[in-house]
Image: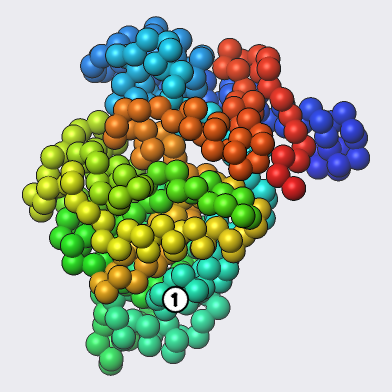
Amino acid sequence: MGISSLIKNNAVWKKFWPIICEKRILSFEKKKFVSEAKGKFKANPEHGSFEDYVDAFKKHRVTYGEYMHKFEYWKLDEKQRDAFISCSEMQCIYRKMVQPEVKTVFWNKILFLNKFSGFAQRRWVEVRKSTYEEFAEMLHSFDCIAKPIEGWRGRGIRKIARVADDADVRPLYDECVKNNILLEECIHACKEIEEFHPQSLNTLRVVTVSNPEKCVVFGAILRMGTGDSIIDNTHNGGVFASIDVKTGIIETDGLDSSGNHYVVHPDSKKVIKGFQIPHWDKVVETCSRATKVLPKLVYAGWDVVVKEGGDVALIEGNHGPDFDGGMQAPKKIGVKQRVKDTVMDLYGIDPLQFISVNSGTLNGYRYNEKVIE
């Protein structure tokens, strides 16, 4: 009998299998994160100590990056540290509160575009299911973005410049079919946002927490590419800054994943803090409306573009948005209590109960088979 059948047919296995999986995840994180930190402290002991990091990992499941740069744990006492919520702790919550059908739609870019077709505002084709003529017509009409249908953090994305009408793009078509590529019309942000870094799209990441009746815009950042990169993702060298969700004004300097701060964009020299996101009210309205498409949606990170003229387009969505970087790192203010209060208000559930204790024993871990019906 396979594991899936055993879990389905055995009440004891069905109850405890998630706990076993959580312990395995914790063991994997411990091996990966602590090993990485040990090497980094040995090579370049910037602040704090390896011993202090290990203690922080046991209590909060933080990565080296969170300890050193994002949260600057080495500066904080235990009470201050406990105000932050790490990426791994949020993943514990997502594993209990995000429904499988939501994950499926957000992970697959084709399913997402079909489900949120009214928000895309661009042409696209699934190359494997398109004809050569449809593919060629796209490339003859405008610049395009090619991306893997399933993927994250901007991996595998490239820009294809518009080609002449008589150009043979058959080899490129065959390559895209082989690699199961999504081809999208290249769109542009409005002039004010594009000026930060014209080579990349410079999207807003807007994080919402919602139920079928109410949506809370929990936080937002502006992401800007750097250098020659067409990608604004922070995992690819991008710079990000926090947006005041009440006003749409950027309230911090820029920050990158290594903890470097930027008063101005490193390439364009455009001042970051104090910039007013154009048409912010429409951004909030668009994201709030998008949450109604999936009634079981709880958490979402929307990648948003403000286009010239004020139209707002959704590029992608994320069912497990990072709270470690964008929501906490720029201001160095923890949001753990806000996460709890927001979910309690919307669902009457304390999400922090799903964070397993980090000593490796999972004492206090509570398993609810169905949290959101």
Query: Relative to 315, is 1 above or below?
Result: above
Residue 55: where, in percent of width, then height?
45, 10
Residue at (34% x, 54% y) in the render: 204
Residue 16: where, in percent of width, then height?
79, 27
Residue 230: where, in percent of width, then height?
26, 59
Residue 17: where, in percent of width, then height?
77, 31
Residue at (36% x, 21% y) in the render: 67
In the image, 174 versus 136, the foreground residue is 136
In the image, 3 versus 193, the foreground residue is 193
Relative side of 242 to 83, left or right: left
Query: Can you tell which quarter of the image residue 24 is in?
Result: top right
Name which residue type carries label 1: Trp
Residue at (26% x, 61% y) in the render: 278
User: Which residue position holds label 1?
Assistant: 124
Query: Can you tell which quarter of the image residue 122 is in?
Result: bottom left
Relative side of 315 to 12, left or right: left
The N terminus lies in quadrant: top right
The answer to whether residue 273 shows anywhere in this view is yes
